[in-house]
Image (cartoon, rainbow, N blue to C red):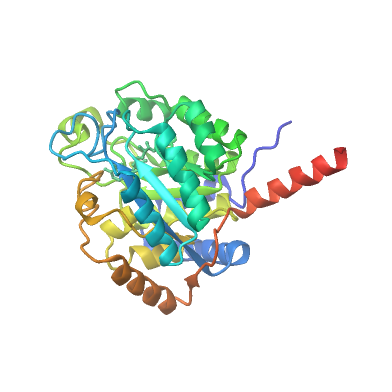
């Protein structure tokens, strides 16, 4: 019988109780356990990854998103080579070991061009590169991998395939999205996924299923953030199509931290960001709460100021006017206050490195 990976997840009944719990005091032991696992498996370093939002053009109709194809209000942009490489130069200057490149699913993306830009980043600054560009063709993924991209991040968004399909009226399918991640791993990418918490129509079963999938997929990176309603999204216009479940998932700080803590248990060695969406719904406490409930990554935004506001996936996303340096200083101070410090280097997934080492050893043994 195939054993299914469960990491260090509690029993299904215990998971269920945690997800139903609304009293922060009752969840404190869960957060403490996730924090201890984090410390034991990945240490106190917090990996800082520079985020560049490459383009807000998108061909998808994701019902929750403010830059979906139908959203006419947002001005569209696409960074050019200089704009992109400048972000990488700044990431390196601030001591970040990874550049995270995110975009809408942009049909006008210069695929060959991006491969060349990736090679330049590697040659000039040696940064690790995470791509988060949506569902792209396999030959594109292979091209970028060959150019030096290291990781691919694609959220499953929800663990409920029917809800996923309902939220994606453009024909994007949940199964295809997961299959793409598996292909990316086969190409040698580290892979990451995650969900939004508190989507309309989402229930506690969905959250439960998601954390089990994080373990089964053996993810190297897991991103969990609350759903934030966007007034211009099609979801808000047809909200009556998503009646509340009998045990609805809640888009709260507490529910998000609960899923994050369970994600750490599902994958003790994975890299887990404290997400911007969580900091947005809980400005004073979200970041430190996440770092105390299993998270070990923060992704400061390096997108040039004129474009930040236009990468408007949810309201308030790009509203900070602070410079890179100001943000960086504040970040260092807040990490120090928590007894944490920035990681030095790329911050690769430990399970990924271990698998690589095993594969190398097997090759050597066969040779
Ligand atoms: N096009 C890429 C990147 C999408 S944006 C892709 O498809 O992977 C990155 C993530 O933002 C999404 O995967 C989604 O989980 C999150 N997101 C989008 N709209 C949101 C909203 N209204 N509230 C919270 N998170 C949102």
Q: Would residue 143 appear left or right of 233 to someone viewing this image?
A: right
- Where is residue 156, by image quadrant? top left
Judge by depth and name the residue closer to the eye, 89 or 205: 89
Q: Is residue 174 above or below residue 122?
A: above
Judge by depth and name the residue closer to the eye, 319 or 195: 319
Query: Which quadrant holds the C terminus?
Result: top right
Image position, residue 22 (x, y; %) = 36, 56
- Where is residue 145, by image quadrant? top right
Q: Is residue 323 above or below residue 339?
A: above
Asked if residue 148 can be seen in this view, the reply is yes
Asked if residue 26 can be seen in this view, the reply is no
Query: Which quadrant holds the N terminus?
Result: top right
Judge by depth and name the residue closer to the eye, 212 or 320: 320
Image position, residue 122 (x, y; %) = 51, 51
Judge by depth and name the residue closer to the eye, 361 or 235: 361
Q: Would residue 296 appear left or right of 170 to someone viewing this image?
A: right
How many marks the image carries: the answer is 0
What residue appears at the point 41 percent right and 67 percent down from the top-left corner?
94
- Where is residue 81, by image quadrant? top left
The residue sitting at the top extreme is 171
Q: Would residue 138 appear left or right of 285 to someone viewing this image?
A: right
Image position, residue 11 (x, y; %) = 58, 48
The residue sitting at the left extreme is 73
Ligand 1 positioned in quadrant: top left
Image position, residue 205 (x, y; %) = 44, 38
What residue appears at the point 69 percent right and 46 percent down from the top-left corner?
355
What residue appears at the point 26 percent right and 35 percent down from the top-left corner?
57
């Amino acid at each position: 019988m195939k054993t299914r990976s469960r990491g260090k997840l509690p029993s299904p009944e215990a998971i269920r109780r945690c997800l139903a719990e609304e009293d922060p005091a009752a969840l404190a032991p869960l957060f403490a356990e996730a924090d201890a696992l984090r410390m034991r498996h990945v240490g106190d370093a917090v990996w800082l990854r520079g985020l560049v939002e490459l383009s807000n053009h998108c061909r998808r109709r994701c019902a929750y998103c403010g830059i979906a194809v139908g959203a006419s209000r947002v001005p569209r942009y696409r960074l050019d080579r200089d704009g992109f490489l400048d972000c990488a130069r700044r990431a390196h200057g601030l001591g970040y070991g990874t550049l995270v490149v995110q975009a809408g699913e942009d049909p006008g993306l210069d695929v060959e061009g991006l491969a060349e830009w990736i090679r330049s980043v590697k040659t000039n600054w040696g940064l690790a590169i995470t791509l988060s560009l949506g569902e792209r063709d396999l030959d594109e993924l292979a091209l970028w991998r060959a150019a030096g991209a290291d990781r691919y991040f694609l959220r499953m968004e929800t663990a409920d395939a029917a809800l996923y399909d309902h939220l994606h009226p453009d024909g994007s399918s949940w199964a295809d999205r997961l299959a793409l991640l598996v292909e990316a791993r086969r190409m040698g990418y580290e892979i990451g996924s995650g969900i939004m918490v508190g989507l309309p129509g989402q229930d506690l079963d969905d959250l439960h299923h998601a954390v089990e999938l994080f373990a089964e997929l053996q993810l190297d990176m897991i991103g969990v953030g609350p759903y934030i309603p966007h007034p211009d999204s099609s979801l808000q216009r047809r909200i009556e199509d998503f009646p509340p479940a009998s045990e609805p998932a809640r888009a709260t700080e507490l529910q998000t931290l609960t899923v994050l803590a369970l994600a750490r248990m599902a994958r003790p060695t994975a890299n887990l960001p404290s997400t911007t969406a969580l900091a947005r719904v809980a400005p004073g406490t979200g970041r430190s709460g996440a770092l105390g409930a299993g998270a070990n990554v923060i992704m400061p935004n390096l997108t040039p100021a004129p474009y930040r506001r236009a990468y408007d996936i949810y309201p308030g996303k790009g509203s900070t006017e602070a410079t890179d340096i100001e943000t960086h200083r504040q970040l260092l101070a807040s990490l120090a206050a928590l007894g944490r410090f920035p990681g030095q280097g790329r911050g690769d997934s430990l399970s990924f490195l271990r698998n690589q080492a095993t594969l190398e050893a097997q090759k050597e043994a066969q040779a």
